[in-house]
Amino acid sequence: MSILIVIFTAILLLLSAFVVLIILMQKPSANAGMGSALGGGAAEQAFGGNAANVLTKTTIFLTIGFFVLSFALYLGNLAVANVGDKTTAESGELSSLVSEIEEDAVEETKVEVPISPEIDAAAQAAAKAVEEQAASLDDVLSDEATDVETTQPAK
């Protein structure tokens, strides 16, 4: 799909350059316009006496082609963007499925280990000792904070 977008973009560039050249070949009056800069009556020699008529019709058709091709490229770019969004959404769904499977596998592999009453009592005693240690640390820190506040001079 992206190769077609590149090809149509190149065609659009060529078409726009051709539209510019066709418009520059037109002369609004006998001695005016950029047509005189491109060789004067070159368009009349190439297309005959009805040069203005031929150039006008060519300009209309090329301009319509320009807008149609531009709109087609817009739709093509939208399609490519939507395909990218769907791919991203599908990969997100896939990763969520993988994480669910991993969570289920972890839950299934959990093993209950029986704890003896001696180990349970020792764990509770250790937790109590840690709590006492934390409380005494809090007391020491609060005493030091009070000492720092009292030693600072008043402003």
Image: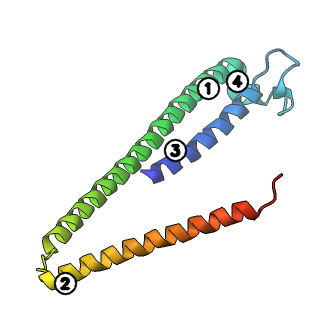
In front of the other: 33 or 116: 116
Relative to residue 94, is residue 53 drawn left or right? right
Residue drawn 70% across the image and 19% down it: 52
Q: Mark number for residue 8?
A: 3
Q: At x 25% / y 79%, what residue is drawn?
A: 123
Q: Amino acid at mark 2?
A: Ile
Q: How many marks?
A: 4
For the residues labelled 3 and 1, the Cα–Cα distance comes to 20 Å
Distance of mark 4 from mark 1, alpha carbons?
14 Å
Residues at marks 3 and 2, CA–CA distance in whole angstroms: 77 Å
Residue 88 drawn at (x, y percent): 37, 53
Identify the disc placed on residue 130: none
Q: Nearer the viewer, mark 4 or mark 3?
A: 3
Q: Which residue is mark 2?
A: 119
Kind of residue sitting beneath label 3? Phe
Q: Mark 2 packing: few (<14 Cα in 10 Å), some, or many (20+)?
A: few
> Toward which corner of the image does residue 148 lie, by quadrant?
bottom right
Residue 106 drawn above or below residue 1:
below
Write down the quadrant of residue 66 in the picture.
Answer: top right
Using the numbered discs, state the Cα–Cα distance from disc 4 to disc 3 in whole angstroms: 33 Å
Secondary structure found at label 4: helix
